[in-house]
Image: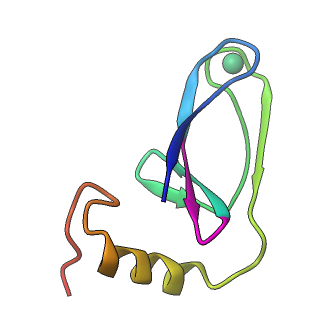
Amino acid sequence: MSSEEIKCPTCDNLIGYSYDIDGVMFLDCGGLIVRELKSNCKQCGREFFWVVPNIRLERLIKRVLKNRKQFFGDTPRN
Ligand SMILES: [Zn+2]
């Protein structure tokens, strides 16, 4: 799994980080793993879209957490 900084193309504001999980790119943004996002850059107002195919996100994340406990910088509680 690799992660990459996602920045606003207009003003370079750091929006979040992308994670490649099983070939699917998720956005890690403010404590959430985002599958669908329609929002605006809070620095310049540019529209920002992020869409991930409809898959079983929860199961996928749990599987990743099992293998990589550092994924969210924390360990799962169960
Ligand atoms: Zn911006």
- The answer to whether residue 43 is magenta is no
Q: Is residue 13 above or below residue 73?
A: above
- The answer to whether residue 19 is magenta is yes
The percent position of residue 71, horizontal first and vertical second, equals: 34, 60
The percent position of residue 59, horizontal first and vertical second, equals: 50, 87
Q: Classify the position of ligand 1 by quadrant: top left, top right, bottom left or bottom right.
A: top right
Q: Nearer the viewer, residue 31 or 57?
A: 57
By what rule are the colours in the image chosen? rainbow
The percent position of residue 75, horizontal first and vertical second, equals: 20, 69
Q: Nearer the viewer, residue 46 or 20?
A: 20
Q: Is residue 10 above or below residue 21?
A: above
The quadrant holding residue 6 is: top right
- Quadrant containing the C terminus in the rendered view: bottom left
Left or right? Give the position of 75 relative to 71.
left
Highlighted magenta segment, given as a residue range: 17-23
Residue under the image location 79 percent in, 24 percent down: 46
The percent position of residue 13, horizontal first and vertical second, equals: 58, 19
